[in-house]
Image (cartoon, rainbow, N blue to C red):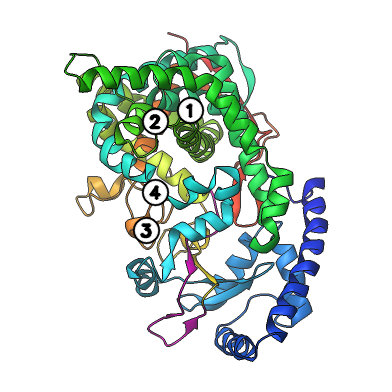
Amino acid sequence: MFSSSSPEVYLLVSAGLVGITVQLFLQSQRVSSSSRRSARHHDVIAKLNAIPTVGSTNWGGSWRSAIKNIRGTSGVVQEGYNRYKNVPFKIPLLYNWMVVVSGAKLLEEVKAAPDDQLSAAEGTNDFLKIAFTMGHRVANEPYHFVVIKTQLNRKLSSLCPIVEDEISVALSEVFSSQEWKPVVALEAIQKVVSGASNRIFVGLPLCRNPDWLEFGLQFAVDSLSAARRAFIFDDIISRIIASLVTSTESQVGRAVEFLGPIIRERQKIADRARSGEVVNMPDDFLQWLIDTGIETTEREITQRILVMVFASVHVTASSLMCAVYNLAAHPEYLEPLREEVDTVVRQHGWTKAATDKMYKIDSFLKESLRLGGASSLIMLRKVLKDFTFSDGRVIPRGCYISAPSCAIHHDEEFYDKPNAFDPFRFVRPRSNGKDMKQGMVSLAPDYLAFGHGKHACPGRFAAAMIQKTILAHIVSSYDLKLDDDAPASCRTVEFGIFIAPDPTTTVLLRKRAT
């Protein structure tokens, strides 16, 4: 992510002004060429005017507000939530409007809307420019989500021990000092998450190939950076711009050098199995993709694996890094966490059953997610057909709808002392027998870290297992603290709706004396 003072932000804004000029010219040509389109334009304006605006409402002011929002939307979203809680409001984007909704009733309406009216896929594709960073087929045919739901999520119990093995190996390599040593937290955690995730994605031995792991980390960074650059342009010109700022083709080609030989060998094994020969089939995400038969070329299958690498490195590592920082800022919680981990592992070993019973670890992670989410807005939808809320407001086709996750997570209506870090906040309802649905993967209108409804993150169960196992190992085997002059909470950087921990943040860490 970029900081608000990053030179690249200003470069992007300057480039965006060029894009705005071109886009406005094209829009003017389209409007003037058709009276029907002109009527549609006035109808859209009338519907939008019925929705309160946060930021300037005049034409020039809305563009200035949109450009300002490139540097981060959390402030304007919080302002809108404070003024229009439970009522739709809108904020300007460079070429469109984002309508923000909150409250259980309105969120339920968004959740229940059909995909051909409010599209989660199109919203994600537009904001991450997946067609340009991951490939058009990946964007248009996301069958890997089905593989996650039908294969990955169902096999977490059998995968947990091998993931734990990989985490143990990776941690011993990344955190090895017996003395206090500053560690660049995000970089170190990305390496551990990458190793654990790749054990699921491609298996041994590739998951321990340092060149592959380094390539995967760099691919994730480059892809997100390319998406940010392409984000400031409308689809009309983003195809041209994206071709200049992305290197997808060359990166996929490089990835095929790693995966191609493995895919060919796997396909040979599958052919032998189909002929009746008894063979030992690998059981990882790569094999599940091959088994679907939907895509058969090395390049196509490789692109799907890269999608998984991208998602796991950034989302999983960033949220875990916030928890590690909170642990270093509050070392007084190490002992109660250690007691829980030691007790559970002694009873169940390093298994999925064990991680399921690590309620304090789970709560610690969930509280860190609540305070340090990955975006200021979530449940992103693109409006494909005009959408009418129960209050009568109509959201025009082409706009976006989302929910203010950070604002909701800091609302005292839902959380006692919402700005305070309370790591065992979600353990107490369990112990009181009031609510057993307090886990970090739970979904609710007042907890939106993973979204809400059928389009909630399908990989959250695997991500939670990996995060809990890593954090459990860290509290069991290491001591943590912060420098004396470090801030009490992890610094973050923003770009548009996205929020990430400052990648330069360090924590002090040493191996625990035994």
Left or right of 430, for residue 495: right
Is residue 375 in the magenta section? yes
Write down the residue under mark 4: 457
Relative to 196, does residue 303 appear above or below in the rendering? below
Relative to 236, does residue 334 appear above or below in the rendering? above
Question: In front of the other: label 4 or label 2?
Answer: 4
Q: From mark 4 to mark 1, how far is it between C-alphas?
A: 18 Å
Write down the residue under mark 2: 466
Write down the residue under mark 1: 193
- Whichever of labels 2 and 1 marks the residue nearer the N terminus, that label is 1
Q: Where is residue 140 drawn, in percent x and y?
A: 46, 52
- Whichever of labels 1 and 3 marks the residue nearer the N terminus, that label is 1
Relative to 162, does residue 427 appear above or below in the rendering? below
Q: Where is residue 364 drawn, in percent x and y?
A: 41, 39
**Tags 2 and 3 in contact by the CB under 8 Å rule?**
no
Q: From mark 1 to mark 3, how far is it between C-alphas?
A: 25 Å
Q: What range is drawn magenta here?
A: 374-396
Q: Which SS class for mark 2? A: helix
Residue type of the residue flagged with mark 3: His
**Tags 3 and 4 in contact by the CB under 8 Å rule?**
no
Q: Residue at x 74, y 51 (%)?
A: 4
* Residue 440 shows up from this direction: no
Within 10 Å of disc 2 (Cα), the crowding (few <14, some 14-19, many 20+) is: many
